[in-house]
Amino acid sequence: MTKRRTIRIILAGAGLFALTAGILQGGYRDTLIKAVHICMECIGIG
């Protein structure tokens, strides 16, 4: 159980690091813009 818990903590830390790096690089903005464009095309407005 201890080994499994350690692996989970390491993976959670790596995920948090990747999420933080993406936010700091502005990746969320690109994703939001793409999502809005796809949604607008699907509805037929854009």
Image (tube, rainbow, N blue to C red):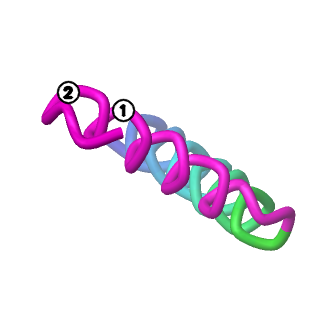
Foreground: 13 or 39?
39
Per the image, the residue denoted by label 1 is: 38
Magenta segment, prevailing SS (helix, strand or loop): helix
Residue 21, position as x, y percentages in the image: 80, 61
Q: Relative to 43, say whether 19 is above or below.
A: below
- Badge 2 vs badge 1, beta-carbon distance below 8 Å: yes
Residue 41, position as x, y percentages in the image: 30, 29
Q: Secondary structure at mark 1?
A: helix
Per the image, the residue denoted by label 2 is: 42
- Quadrant of residue 35 within the rendered picture: top left
The amino acid type, in three-letter code, at marker 2 is: Cys
Boundaries of the magenta span = 25-46
Q: Is residue 22 left or right of residue 10?
A: right
Residue 30, position as x, y percentages in the image: 66, 51
Q: Is residue 45 left or right of residue 7?
A: left
The quadrant the N terminus occupies is top left
Seen at 43% across and 41% down, the residue is 37
The residues tagged by marks 2 and 1 sit, at their Cα atoms, a distance apart of 6 Å
Seen at 64% across and 62% down, the residue is 29
Seen at 54% across and 52% down, the residue is 33
Foreground: 16 or 22?
22
